């Protein structure tokens, strides 16, 4: 299957969800090109950008699992 470069933007609104997000990203570590996390203390959220080089089904699975975590929002942007 063809791999594509994708950015997954994650906003963690509940601090209790951070561990679950990190565990999930660890499971997909073979596809991760880079990751940047920004704690935005004034708003009480954490913002994470993850760059993947992965097949579409892998990216969709990760995004879907992230979206199922309570207190987490995730969106993807894929390069053409």
Image (tube, grey):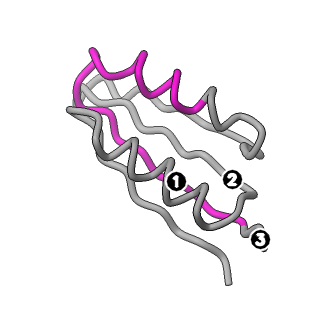
The local secondary structure at tag 2 comes to strand
Q: Which residues are magenta?
A: 5-25
Quadrant in the rendering for residue 43: top left
Residue 57's x, y, as percent? 58, 63
Q: Are marks 1 and 2 in contact (CB under 8 Å)?
A: yes
Residue under label 3: 1
Q: What residue lies at 21% left-to-right and 32% top-to-bottom?
A: 70
Is residue 16 shown above or below 80? above
Q: Position of residue 67 (x, y in %)?
A: 32, 46
Label 3 sits on a secondary structure element that is loop
Q: Nearer the viewer, residue 53 or 46?
A: 53
Label number found at residue 52: 2
- Taking the spot 71% from the left edge, 34% from the top edge, the residue there is 29
Q: Earlier in the sequence, mark 1 or mark 3?
A: 3
In the rendered view, does 70 fall on the left or right side of 60? Answer: left
Residue 58 position by quadrant: bottom right
């Amino acid at each position: 299957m063809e791999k594509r470069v994708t950015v997954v933007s994650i906003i963690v609104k509940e601090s209790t969800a951070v561990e679950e997000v990190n565990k999930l990203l660890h499971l997909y570590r073979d596809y991760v090109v880079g990751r940047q996390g920004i704690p935005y203390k004034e708003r009480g959220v954490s913002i994470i950008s993850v760059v993947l080089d992965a097949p579409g089904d892998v990216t969709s699975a990760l995004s879907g699992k992230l979206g199922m975590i309570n207190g987490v929002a995730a969106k993807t942007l894929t390069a053409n």
